[in-house]
Amino acid sequence: MNTPDWITRSVAILRSPEKPEPKKAPAPAERAQAATKSGAGAAALRSTRERLNATLRHKEEALSPRVLRRTLEELKAIVDPQVSEVEGGRRAMGVAGWYANASLDERRDMWLLMSEQFVADAAKVKLAQTQFAAAVGTPDEAVAEVRYRRATVSPRRRLLQRFSAFPEGFRFLVNLRADLLPHLKADKRLQALDVEMEYMFSTWFDVGFLDLRRISWDSPASLIEKLIKYEAVHDIKSWADVKNRLDSDRRCYGFFHPRMPDEPLIFVEVALMDDMADNIMPLLDESAAPADLKKATTAIFYSISNTQTGLRGVSFGDSLIKRVVETLHEEFPRLKNFATLSPIPGFRSWLGKNAATLLAQLDEKEFTLLGRAVGFEPPTAQHFLTAADNALALNEKSAVRRVLLHGAAQYLGRELDDGKPLDPVARFHLGNGARVERINWGGDPSPKGLKQSCGLMVNYLYDLKRLDKHRALLAQGKIPVSGAIEDLYI
């Protein structure tokens, strides 16, 4: 049978599940929660092993046992050692075609098959482990280690490799993982597939394989549309808005993979200025005249967006910044300062939980002034939070404003979770060797900025001569901050 016929037969089989009239099934998360509440998880959620050996389908299952067996056969055919890489890739493309038209629950059945049925042989792993342990310290140690490593490699990895072989295979797998991620918490059986994919992606999308490309107003419209779609920090509202962000005094760079050449994996927007920016609004002002590049001494990274949910856990943001800094240095030798103008997305939530503790740290004078400012003595955490949510109305000498800045300094400069900065944006930049440089009052007066940080923004400074020193400090549990931040500590 020739290859096109095989693919046609495969897809036809997969598209013909034996099932009753369509009926909306509970979502996977709902099924898992129901099973937990009833204490009958094992009966409500059968493993693929149990379903493959069954005759009848449970009502919450998408594919019948017969179709599930056929689906497994098609997956196994992809990794058949008797077929070439090219043929394996063509078979994978046929299954990917079925997946594109499958319902969410049908897709989930395929994930479960990939996760539960393509595992390493436990007996071989145990034997190889025993032989390796016995060989440690002997001339046979290296050979035994190789055998052990090979024994632990699951057939699932080979399956993923075959899916990556056809032209759109990389994009298919990245999208598949994006589909799968929201269901991990509800169904732990999918974790093996997820971990395998994250491992494979960390290799396939290593920064050494990525191309750094500038995105400009002259780039294809389809690429510029992707900037609008994926911008995650400051929403792009119009074509005039995106044109402003790609003007002569701006730069936008993205990482691209050769197998996904029209899709940026991550991109950064940069403003070239003569000083460190303290407010996002001038940078987003479509009517503002471009800055004079001859006077530019500072590069401000004001937005960094990951575009592929399926690549969660694969880190290349730090490498992007380093490459962009090098590229900007080459084009603009006068640039001396590299900093961000960043949101503080977790601050308001943290403040709501820790306001009482923050107020307890104030000295008697500051506590009294705060009470007068909020109109209630002694002030409670709720009085303070209510006033803080109207931050833009506070004058420069307001006690509420001072306490808010104290809290932001505490949050950014001292709060750690398992040795890492609590704020996700701080975790990213400080992990790359930056330091907390300055907190900017009213830096983001947009509704989003007010909601997540009472309008505050922060500059992280990339001092190229001290990046390693700052990383070392962070490894010791000390967040690197400027003197201006230290002055705000209570």
Image (cartoon, rainbow, N blue to C red):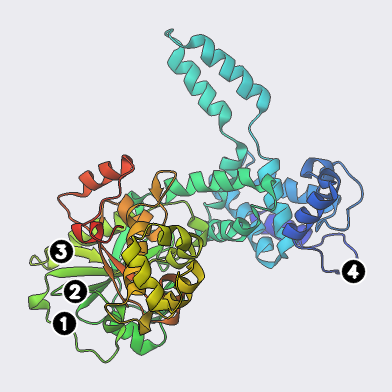
Residue at (32%, 60%) from the top-left corner?
409
Mark 1: amino acid: Ala
Crowd class of label 3 (few under 14; some 14 to 19; many from 20; radius 10 Å): some
Q: Position of residue 59 (x, y in %)?
A: 88, 58
Residue contact at pointers 2 and 1, CB within 8 angstroms: yes
Whole-percent x, y for residue 471 in the image? 27, 45
User: In which quadrant of the rendered image does the C terminus lie?
Assistant: bottom left
Q: Nearer the viewer, mark 3 or mark 2?
A: 3
Nearer to me, 29 or 353: 353
Q: Earlier in the sequence, mark 1 or mark 4?
A: 4
Query: How many angstroms separate mark 1 from mark 3 (CA)?
Result: 16 Å
Residue bearing mark 3: 337
Secondary structure state at the residue bearing disc 1: loop
The CA span between labels 4 and 3 is 65 Å
Residue linked to disc 4: 21
The local crowd at label 1, few if under 14, some if 14 to 19, many if 20 or more residues have their Cα within 10 Å, is: some
Residue 119 falls left or right of residue 421: right
